[in-house]
Amino acid sequence: MNDSQLTSLVKDMTLHEKVGQLVQLATPFFKGASDKGQITGPMQEMGLSHEDIENTGSVLGASGAKETIAIQRKHLEDNRLGIPLLFMSDIVHGFRTIFPVPLAIGCSWDLDLAEKSAALAAKEAAVSGGHVTFAPMVDLSREPRWGRGMESTGEDTYLNSGFARSFVRGFQGDLQQDAYKVASCVKHFAAYGAPEGGRDYNTVDMSEWMLRESYLPAYKAALDEGCEMVMTAFNILNGIPSTGNKWLMRNLLRDEWNFDGVLISDWGAVKELLPHGVAQDEKEAALKTLRAGVDIEMMTSYYFKYTSELVEEGLLEESTIDEAVLRILRLKNKLGLFENPYREADETDEKTFILAPEHRNVARELAAKSVVLLKNEQALPLNNNNNIALVGPFANNTDILGPWSWGGSAEDTITLDTGMKHRLNTDHLLIAEGSGIETGTEQQLQEALQTASRADVIVAALGEHSDMSGEAGSRADIRLPEIQLELLKQLKSLGKPVIAVLFNGRPLDVREVIEHADAVLEAWYPGTEGGNAVADILFGDVNPSGKLSMSFPHSVGQVPVYYNQFNTGRPKDAPDAQIRFVSQYLDIPNEALFPFGYGLSYSTYHYSEMSLSTDHITPDEKLTVKVNVTNTSETSGEETVQLYIRDLVGDVVRPLKELKDFKKVTLKPGETTTVEFTIEESQLRYYHADLDYKSDAGEFEVFVGPNSRDIQSRKFKLGNV
Ligand code: NOJ
């Protein structure tokens, strides 16, 4: 259809039909759904009629070609104007082949492989009948207590923006041209990753300056890449729930950023205006969200119940509804649904593509690249001639897919023991559970100690079960559960090398793990191929290269702790600092235990002194930074060379460091390569006090190194100073 046909379609629609397009309901509400559950109950509760369902515009969570085709077919029979349904769901890091959780992908710093993983997820979703994925989630987070940090790529604006673009390219590509793509929906707009105290759904209050400087760029990056949809956040932002926040949705998103795609509420978020206390009743909640420009209401029925009344009473212009409907129809049209309402749903293709070897291979490669080696006292890689005890609740556990992996399944998942058995004569592998994740018995512990005492080396597979992170998965104590720490201590007391492998969804307080293990691998939730990928690292078939995309705090009392902090007026390390009256904790260090960008390798690298092409550039000139990196070990490896900048004097305070670029290099033993970065004026811009985005003439510091802590620096000037 062309745009004028779409406009006339809107004209032909009754107000009720239009409102239907603005509603999204879960799969069981629709005829043809495989699990119809007890849907008459919920329909009555929500006050929905059969006519409402026949006019509903989109479906949440339908999956599988058979089901989506059946639902669409029935719907087209019932819908007066034959407007097809849009099928949306959360394909966050894989559909059936599950890739590592996004926070892990963040640690790979591999934008191309991230894009590929999203493309393969889209392919599996598309042949299963999906049209839109609620991804990428790009909420910047400095909050390890918040369980949803694992859905994001971490704490840095620049890195998150890069991943946002990669994910959108991978999922969506060119929707009209490319095969096997799904539209992207970036979420959660805005600043959902900064809840007070790390408690999910909690208050977010930050200056517009901080919002623009750190939190908004990744959403914007996704939109610049053409992302078709945006989802609102549950949180309030500066006193107003995002879902009813006119400034955020109309002034910023629509008017300033020119977003003309579809804006959807998060699940039930329209209704939440009531407990937030900004709407006195359901009708006002509907009015506020419609006025704010939220096109689709997910999983509540206030739009159905009140929109006609609101229009009749003159509180809402019908043109507001028409605009929203047109945006939704345009998306359906872009997906080609008017011509082919089933798009790429195909049961034969499902058999061919889902869990295809290529998908598994990429999942394995990406999982191995996401693992971060935090400590290694010559305990890794493992020697497969040794007897190895694999102990702990994650020794043989399929709960390694992560909380957003509803399409994945346990039977497809490679557990750690399976991955290790692929490498090792099984006589050499001794397995014991030792404890559960949160509870355990003395007998389990004793069995594990006996098993471990027969081995040369112990691998302790520890972590959080997936419900301990994800939505509503906030924790105030971010250490491993006590029972596992006890297991680790007891294992260490056997006097053998202990390697801890952690499966979890947040930066943990790992002090005790570091103390009682000779090597520590952060494996996150590595996905379907997790066991193989971790074994690849353990046995040295793959050299670890992951670098943290979120700082690991020294203790929860420091949180939020992040690398790009400000200096304060009383920095602890200033040459003239006093002993007491400086910005510090009296009982713990200021610094994270493991900073952003940190990660070890089986190789060692030497960085030469960096050189600058000039120490002075004008706004039209570029500066080249060069550093030679040498692999000084006997093992080939991949290093991520990082470039940070500090603006020494600003109109407002500037972070001590800001990531501006990074390069990955692969080096053979003894090999040296020159890594080159270019700096130009556009990278030196920031939001001033009046929210102007520009650079200032003046002095800057540039840093290069293997992480945000161990870096060398040089100074340069911009402009005529
Ligand atoms: C609630 C979550 O916050 C959001 O991320 C997700 O996309 C929706 N539910 C739909 O499942």
Image (cartoon, rainbow, N blue to C red):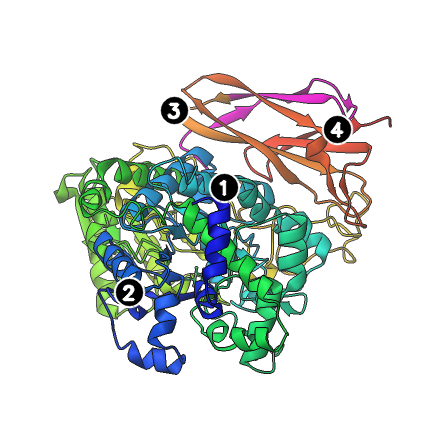
Ligand 1 occupies quarter: bottom left
Give the percent coordinates (x, y) of residue 35: 23, 68
Disc 2/disc 3 C-alpha distance (Å): 37 Å
Label 3 to label 1: alpha-carbon separation:
26 Å
Separation of marks 4 and 1 at Cα, in angstroms: 29 Å
Residue drawn where x is 45% and y is 73% of the image? 300
Residue placed under numbered mark 2 in the picture? 436
Give the structural element (helix, strand or loop) at label 2. Answer: loop
Mark positioned earlier in the residue sequence (2 or 3) = 2
- Tell me the distance, in whole angstroms, between the alpha carbons under discs 4 and 2: 53 Å
Inter-mark Cα distance, 1 to 2: 35 Å
Look at mark 3 in the image and give the residue it sits on: 636
Which residue is identified by label 4?
A: 715
Q: How many marks?
A: 4
Dot 2 beta carbon under 8 Å from ligand 1: no
The residue that label 1 is drawn on is 163
Point out the tag, 3 or 4, that comes first from the N-terminus.
3
Mark 4 touching mark 1, by CB under 8 A? no
Q: Residue drawn at (77%, 49%), measured in percent from left and top? A: 691
In primary-sequence order, the first of circles 1 and 2 is 1
Neighbourhood count class around disc 1 (C-alpha, 10 Å): few under 14, some 14–19, many 20 upward: many
Label 1 SS: helix
Q: Which one is in front, 32 or 396?
A: 32
Query: Position of 379 compared to 718: left or right?
Result: left
Q: Is residue 448 above or below residue 711?
A: below
Could you tell me the amino acid type at mark 2?
Gly
Highlighted magenta segment, given as a residue range: 600-629
Outermost residue toward the right in this view:
721
Q: Is residue 575 above or below residue 477?
A: above
Q: Assess whether mark 2 and mark 4 are in contact (beta carbons under 8 angstroms).
A: no
Which residue type carries mark 3?
Ser
Residue 620 magenta-highlighted: yes
